[in-house]
Image (tube, helix red, strand yellow):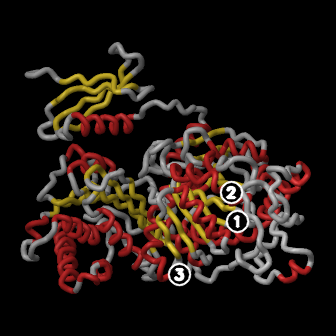
Amino acid sequence: MSTASSEQREITVGIAGAAGDGLDKTGDTLAHTASRLGLHVYAYNSYQSLIRGGHTWLRLRIGEQKVTNHGDHLNALIALNEDSLERHAPEVEPGGVILFNSDKLRCDPFLVRDGVRVLEVPFKTLTKDLGKLLPVMQNTVVLGALIHVIGLEFDVMAGMLADTFAHKGPQIIEQNVGVARVGYDYARQNLEPMGYTWSFTRTRLPVLTGNTAMAMGAVAAGCKFYAAYPMSPASSILHWFMAHGERCGVAVKQAEDELAVANMTIGAGHAGVRAMCATSGGGFALMTEAIGMASILEAPAVFINVQRGGPSTGLPTKTEQGDLNQVFGASQGDYPRMIVAPVNLTDCYYMTVEAFNIAEKFQLPVIMISDLLLGQHVETVEADALKPDVPIERGELIRDASAALMSGGFKRYTFTPSGVSPRVLPGTEGTAYVAATDDHDETGVLISDEHTNPALRRKSQEKRMHKLKGVLAQLPPPRLEGPADADVTLIGWGSTWGVIHEAASQLNEIGIRANHLHIRYLFPFHNREVREILQACRRTAVVECNYTGQFARHLRAETGFSVDDLILKYNGEPFEPGDIVERVKAILEGRPYNGQVAQDEAREMAYHYIRVYLQEDARPVRFEQISEGGYSEPVWQVQIAAREGGKPLGKLFIGLETGSIHEWRAEAVGA
């Protein structure tokens, strides 16, 4: 029978398998099918640094209203291998459905919660009349079944498949649609839908990522040069420019390293071309001296840091907000720059436009700090959200220098009250000057050698730093979202906006009044406005994805305000609304965070041990906290059993405090 209320207007679907199993295409087909019906989508892919194998976990949250994060529920699961069933079948909530190819897999009832239905899809039987098929087409059969189960329209999915395979011709289109059709028909005959009664607007919603939105925003802003060295998770910006750069009139250069990338970008900006580059933390480390050079040359340039887990190589395919200190400390000395942190896809687009305008108006580098979550997650936006007609502001760029020459010669670095000097394109007649990385006077004469002059150095430095007042005056200050008399104020920056926004709503629903302050502009900082907001708050907590609370420290440095609490996450995965809600409840109840290994973490650690040492033919079946045993700390005693038959194999002892694997104790032979 139907297992869902007709009032349901949202579902979360998980697709799990190994790298190379075609999850991206499957998820893309589902996301675009939903978006063509007018439904909103937010998808987050938790993947590993592998081309083949390992584990990939894609979650798509689909709703009639805008969804701003991947949520903390799981209603339907497509499992493409045994490991995926082991990992995620227990997460499917009552009323949900698990689907898989029954030719390859069997779902142990031990893994399935009460009230969850299982649909075994016999791939070979269903497709025996459809010719020779690639193994990856099991995905299409199961996805066709899912379309029926969650109440979407098959014809819309078929149209999506036709568009996807149009370049391969009608025979391939017919084959893929036919494969999806047999899955859809099989589900229709064997399983009632989950009961979702959608109201489709049929307004096609664009589906894109934050990285794509930044690239598109750059093109709209008039970017004509893009340089990069491939580094996850920023590489898809380069991929987009390689695919579209020629059509959009953008010169694209893959350089030998990030040192070259940064210097090429600055050179292009100095020459009068709007220029941008992007990397992640390791690459940004190589760019830092050049960023200071852009500032002293007063050359406009846009730099993007799409953060990942660090330090060093760290976690190339996981998210984190751990580079904030690095971005603040980029280059040596004091110098003017703007640092911005977009919060969503529309921000990624319009703040990139803003970055180019600020860079040229104030002749300085602009650093945009994103992360894997914001850069790579897939999301729908409203059809008219990203407009190509954006303001282009080039500032003090003069093309006719005759007036300056008549008044005594061109002074590229004229000391002005705003700190902004007239800029010409190199080669403009009569305006030759030295653009030096040493400090210099108004005409470009160095003041670092025989012409060292403390007075000129003071005024030169003040001239550059005065730009920050003008920059700040153009930036809108942050505003408080939610009830003014809240019990707790959640503070965030960058990609955490959506999840904090939903967490605040959930807290209000359970009687804990919460509001939300989110910061986009990190430097220069609206210290007066932010301080006035926070001083009126009852209790404050910064929410961010790093270990040390980097933004909380920056907030204190800029405003003198110390927050009451930190809600931090640094395991490589983004926050979910429930994470924040539970931490706020603990804070208000006086329960401090103790960092102990939770049962779900012990389960993950046990599975890690099994995959590395026991060849994946076992599973954890029972968890118990014990204090005895001679270990230096209390431990989780985890019973490990064979997947087939449930024979006990041994016990794993995991430290409650340290997380150390203290011992694997195999069952005695014959026991």
Residue 136 position within the rendered picture, expressed as x and y whole percent measured from the top left: 20, 65
Residue 148 position in % (x across, y down): 27, 71
Q: Earlier in the sequence, mark 2 or mark 3?
A: 3
Dot placed on the residue nearer the N-terminal end, 1 or 2? 2
First along the sequence among labels 3 and 1: 3
Asked if 163 appears above or below 376 in the picture, the reply is below
Q: CA distance from mark 3 to mark 1?
A: 22 Å
Please state which amino acid type lies under the numbered disc 3: Gly
Asked whether the residues under the numbered discs 3 and 1 touch, taking CB atoms below 8 Å apart as contact, a structural biologist would say no
Residue 468 relative to residue 248: left or right: right
Is there CB contact under 8 Å for labels 1 and 2? Answer: yes
Residue type at mark 2? Met
Tell me the residue that label 1 is attached to.
299
Decide: few, some or many residues near mark 2? Use Cα within 10 Å; few <14, some 14-19, many ≥20: many
Judging from the image, what secondary structure is the residue with disc 1 in? loop
Q: Nearer the viewer, residue 236 or 420?
A: 420
The mark tally for this picture is 3
Point 46% across, 77% down: residue: 244
- The residue to which callout 3 is attached is 249
What residue is shown at x 89% (from left), y 64% (from top)?
417
- The amino acid type, in three-letter code, at marker 1 is Ala
